[in-house]
């Protein structure tokens, strides 16, 4: 079972090259993100070229539930490849805001970041976000520098004290 959970590519979409989001299983049993295969022309499986009918596709609830459970399990184990939205705790997080230091699904991100003040936040794709650990002295700040004297990672506040 551990190989099943830890494999990065088993639950990836070969169209968008990201973790499956709203997974759909085609009649040929290949899995893709529903939005990726619904809008694909021609409507043929990228892996085996078998035709499918886009309007008959729907999110596979069982697989979606399994992926969410795996994502939560991966978070508990410290695996950052798969994230769940920190607001609704249900949807897969597609974005990361470096200002808020949080992962969000598209729906929650648009709701929270709809405020004009938040338009300047550093929002990036969750799969490309680089997260730095919190400073051991200032837990509300992330480390940004390496101190050659102390041989430790430090935040901006610590670097000014040295």
Image (tube, grey):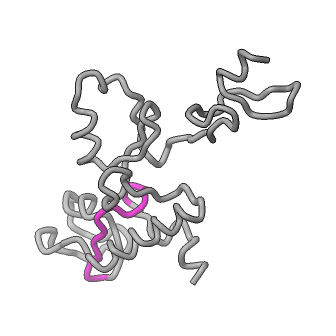
Horizontally, residue 41 falls left or right of residue 18, namely left
Q: Residue furthest right?
A: 149
The answer to which of 79 and 138 lies nearer the viewer is 138
Query: Is the magenta region chiefly helix, strand or loop?
Result: loop
Horizontally, residue 119 falls left or right of residue 159, namely left
64 shown above or below 160:
below
Magenta region: 15-28
Horizontally, residue 139 falls left or right of residue 161, namely left
Q: Quadrant of residue 90?
A: bottom left
| Point 31% across, 63% down: residue | 33
Name the quarter where the N terminus is drawn.
bottom right
- Residue 141 lies, in percent from the top left, at 58, 31
148 shown above or below 9:
above
Residue 22 covered by magenta stretch: yes
The answer to which of 42 and 55 lies nearer the viewer is 55
| Point 21% across, 59% down: residue | 41
| Point 24% across, 23% down: residue | 116
- Residue 149 lies, in percent from the top left, at 88, 25
Q: Residue furthest top?
A: 160
- Residue 66 lies, in percent from the top left, at 39, 76
| Point 69% across, 33% down: residue | 137
């Amino acid at each position: 079972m551990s190989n099943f959970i830890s494999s990065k590519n088993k639950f990836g979409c070969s169209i968008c090259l990201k973790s499956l989001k709203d997974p759909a299983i085609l009649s040929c049993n290949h899995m893709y993100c529903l939005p990726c295969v619904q809008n694909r022309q021609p409507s043929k499986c990228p892996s085996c070229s078998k035709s499918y009918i886009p309007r008959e596709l729907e999110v596979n609830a069982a697989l979606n539930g399994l992926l969410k459970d795996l994502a939560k399990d991966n978070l508990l184990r410290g695996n950052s490849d798969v994230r769940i939205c920190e607001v609704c705790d249900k949807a897969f997080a597609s974005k990361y805001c470096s200002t808020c230091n949080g992962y969000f699904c598209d729906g929650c991100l648009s709701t929270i970041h709809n405020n004009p003040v938040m338009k300047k936040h550093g929002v990036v794709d969750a799969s490309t976000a680089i997260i730095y650990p919190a400073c051991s002295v200032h837990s509300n700040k992330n480390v940004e520098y390496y101190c050659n004297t102390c041989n430790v990672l430090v935040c901006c506040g610590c670097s000014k004290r040295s």
